[in-house]
Amino acid sequence: MDLKPVDLIVDKYQEKRTALISILHDVQDKYKYLPEEALRMVASRLRMDINEIYGVATFYKSFSLVPKGKHSITLCMGTACHVRGGPKILRELKSVLHIEPGQTTSDRQFSLNVVNCLGVCAIGPVMMVDKRFYGEMSPLRARKIIETINKKRSGVES
Amino acid sequence: MRRIKSAKDLEQWKATILKKQGTHEMVVSVCGGTGCQAYDCQKVKMTLQKELGRHGLTKRVALKVTGCPGFCERGPLVTIYPQNIFYQKVTPEDVPEIVSKTIQNGTKVERLLFEDSRNKQKITSASEIPFYRPQMRLLLSRNDLIDPNRIEDYIAIGGYQSLVKALFQMDPDGIIEEIKASGLRGRGGAGYPTGKKWEECKRESGTTKYVICNCDEGDPGAFMDRALMEGNPHSVLEGMLIGAYAIGADHGFIYIRHEYPLAYKNAEIAIQQAKRAGLLGQNILGSGFNFEVEITKGGGAFVCGESTALIASIEGRVGEPRSKQIRTVKQGLWRKPTTLNNVETWANVPLIIEKGSQWFSSIGTEKSKGTKIFSLVGKVKNTGLVEVPMGITLKEIIYDIGGGQQDGRKIKAVQTGGPSGGCIPASLFDLPVDFDSLTEVGSMMGSGGMIVMDEGTCMVDVAKYFVHFLEEESCGKCLPCREGLKRMGQILDRITEGNGNEESLLLLEELAQVVGDTSLCGLGKTASNPVLSALRYFRPEFEAHIRQKRCPAGVCTPLIQYSISEDCTGCGACAKICPTQAIEGEKKKIHRILVEFCSKCGSCKEVCKEEAVIVQ
């Protein structure tokens, strides 16, 4: 594994321990998850114990120690989205993707995440696909969005 | 960008900016907040740019991308100044007409104006719309006027003038006195008097002190801080500068949750610009005062909104709270005296310094001063951010501003205070909204989420939702919170599955009491509020689940069944959409749901135009 990017990320934050969470975010953005080698590297550069880093990486929900899929589907489970039918959308996504929140499809295409609130409550239920927000979701629309991504992919491949 | 070395420099800079802005005959502002982004406001902006260029209007007309004006539900929003024409739900296709009609000929595009559903009248300016009319937008109104990525825009509306006043016309004690006299209380939820907090921190000995801005807005259903940080980050910086000067800190942190990428980006740009302009760094405006700010990103842990957990997180550790026997003003970040305030609190500071404590304290109620921003969301017609004077009633917010019920179902409650708050029934909607009266009825103001619930919302399900939320977010350090919430969740699961009994409620109440009394931090101490308030005001709903095995709102899946009524025209849409092929029937004849295959996804109900799908 090429660990040069990890070096650059730690450099960017000037080896500051305070920046640990930001560093882990950047590492995750780069590799789509937190590879063990990268964490060991961060630990040695910040002169921290790997156990401590592991503790932080597993405490915060944003981090994943397993590889994520190509597309990340993030469903908001905030109160406003909940009362407007968020759970129905989650059920739909689970049945379309055949995975539970936190998991990735076997073809590594989709990861499903749920978050407590995306802060776009006025137009809930809200879903985020690869940093793009979709408001006023319904189970039907959710399914169509996934289908569209799948279609695009098979179109490119064929 | 010029480097400002004195108050006079700033004055001159402002004059130059205003002169330059004066060359524009018109300003077209497009909301670029996260809500409008979901509606593709970027495309609207790009089309506007192209159209203005095509007509050779770029010199006469300024195009501005602003932060969130609050009316997210109607996005993308476009406002044209100085005529003050407010267009809503604008699509890229509408843009050529806006340019040719409104910008070139001064006529309005009627279909894009807001229509008052009560009298079908079109309304031109935002301030006349029922959603905005009762509001008092001291903070949010500035979001309408500035591009958050241009410090010049903030300077133009008088930005950093309060800092000048604080540095050159006041001394630290005077500033603290002013904030104390204003009656400003922390907007993050607890409502602690801000001036008092600053005074306690200033009193501490030692030369190293810190200020922190809490932008870890974790309460689900609340997004005021996101809108402020995205839309007007310089106002937060200015507040922090004034606070830091008052308590004697030279370093500050802004803790932003990672779910808010735009807030992070805009705050970072604002800090860079303020640094380059000399408004952050060494010897600010030649006053001898030094101040630096850094941003720390959160990691998706709700508990990090709690001050001591947040501090642990900034220190790069696991975000576990500690006992507050020694408060953070004495020992906070790296055990140094620290003043931690919420985004909205900081944003209020420049206003108070500018207009005076007397002006500020004339707004609001006896013990809650100023305005408060609420995110009005859920089952209400007009959703978005509303800023109102403290003391306004819930009824005014929900019915006058929010426009009342959304789709024919009666509103039955409003949830305030996030997972630490509770549900307030419609019978108490005459209650004035301030820190103390909401606490009296078993809820709290919290950071400002207001989630409206109607007859289609099951209160047992809501209680269960919050308990599971907190169970998931409990850091696990203390036992009552870690184990108690888990057991409370199990009891509520049983009730919503139809397996509850009379004892369940007694046990639930007892557990709720113990968790509240014995937990370490605010998360656990207030965790019982959603359950206790639901039991207090909506007990019959719990009893229906237990005694009749029925969910009156039709939400709890194990207790409901879908069926098709005689209104069915046999169009077949439901059978086509059903993911489990559980619907059968001939064309043009009444269809039937096969209960054993039905997954209760509700897709059939969604597509049925005759409203023939019934949930019981």
Image (tube, coloured by chain):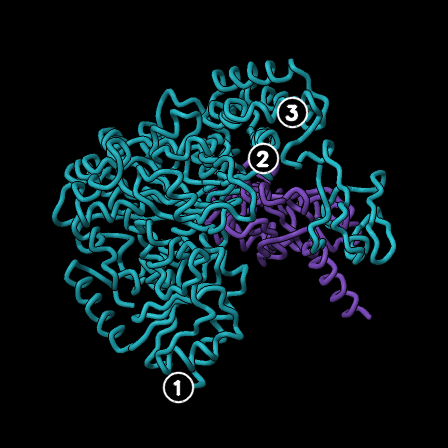
Identify the mark at residue B544; answer none if there is no mark.
3
The chain letter under disc 2 is A
Residue displayed at 41% across by 63% down: B121
User: How dense is the environment of label 1, judged by Cα within 10 Å: few (below 14), some, or many (20 and up)?
Assistant: few
Which amino acid type is shown beneath numbered disc 1? Gly
SS for callout 3 = helix
Residue B250 in the image: state x and y as whole percent.
28, 43
The chain letter under disc 3 is B
SS for callout 1 = loop
Residue A136 in the image: state x and y as whole percent.
59, 54
Using the image as rendered, state which of residue B352 and residue B505 is in the foreground.
B505
Disc 1: which residue:
B56
Which amino acid type is shown beneath numbered disc 3? Ala
Using the image as rendered, state which of residue B123 and residue B588 is in the foreground.
B588
Q: Colour of chain B?
A: cyan
Q: Colour of chain A?
A: purple
Left or right relative to A148: residue B424: left
In three-dimensional space, the C-alpha distance between marks 3 and 2, rounded to whole angstroms, equals 39 Å
